[in-house]
Amino acid sequence: MTATAPTPGPTNPLGGEAYRLTLPNTATAPRIARDFLTSLLGVSRHSKLIDDARLCVTELVTNAHCHTRTPQIRVHVAVNRKRVTVAVTDDGGPLDVDKAFGTLGTALAAGPEQESGRGLALVESLALAWGTGRGGGQYPDRTVVWFTLGRPEAAA
């Protein structure tokens, strides 16, 4: 496990600080990611977001652990005055995305008798925004799932 703060690389478009954590894909990865995010938010102005952030990052890292063969799971956190954005990246490849996340419609439509499939609905209910994508560039098979928490923008 490696953690660096702040991380050089792409600039946070909203200003603020960016952090990165790389974890081995083990059963302890969700707990380590949760503790990492808790520490970051505890020293920032976002302590009110800790509970929601812990739930969301746990869901995304657990999905990467359970549904991919990626050797590493990466957690990227961008923190500014108003928001926190967390992106979880794995090397799962194209087939693993469908297993882990399905389509948005099926991921958010788990019935009461199903034992799984509610995690992304939880993320959607807590986050201002969330989404999925591909790594692109030299890492086209990387899967990225992200969420943003914080104060919504005031209506114009």
Image: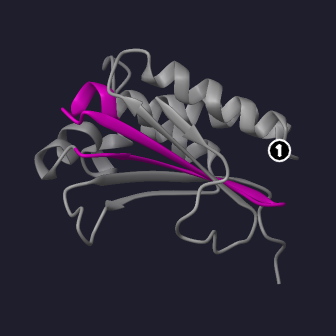
Give the x, y percent position of residue 40: 73, 38
- The vertical placement of 111 against 102, above or below, is above
Residue to which mark 1 is pinned: 46
Magenta stretch: residue 47 in it?
Answer: no
User: At x 37% / y 37%, what residue is drawn?
Assistant: 73
- Give the residue at x 17% y 42%: 96
Direction from residue 126 to residue 147 in the image, left or right: left
Q: Residue at x 33, y 17 (%)?
A: 115
Rendering coords of residue 125 (x, y %): 59, 44
Residue placed most toward the observer, 32 or 149: 32
Answer left or right for 110 relative to 92.
Answer: right
Q: Please give left or right for residue 47 compared with residue 37 in the image.
A: right
Residue at the extreme left: 95
Whether residue 48 is visible here, answered yes or no, is yes
> For this rendering, which residue is in front, 139 or 147?
139
> Where 118 falls versus 103 (above or below)?
above
Mark 1: few/some/many CA within 10 Å (<14, 14-19, 20+): many
Front position in the image: 69 or 104: 69
Q: Amino acid at mark 1?
A: His
- x, y percent for residue 113: 32, 17
Q: Kindly state the secondary structure of the residue where label 1 is placed.
A: loop
Where is residue 128, by image quadrant? bottom right
Magenta run includes residue 80:
yes
Give percent across and percent down for residue 20.
55, 47
- In the depicted structure, whether residue 48 falls above or below residue 86: above
The span shown in magenta is 64-91
Q: Is residue 118 visible?
A: no
To which quarter of the image does residue 62 belong?
A: top left
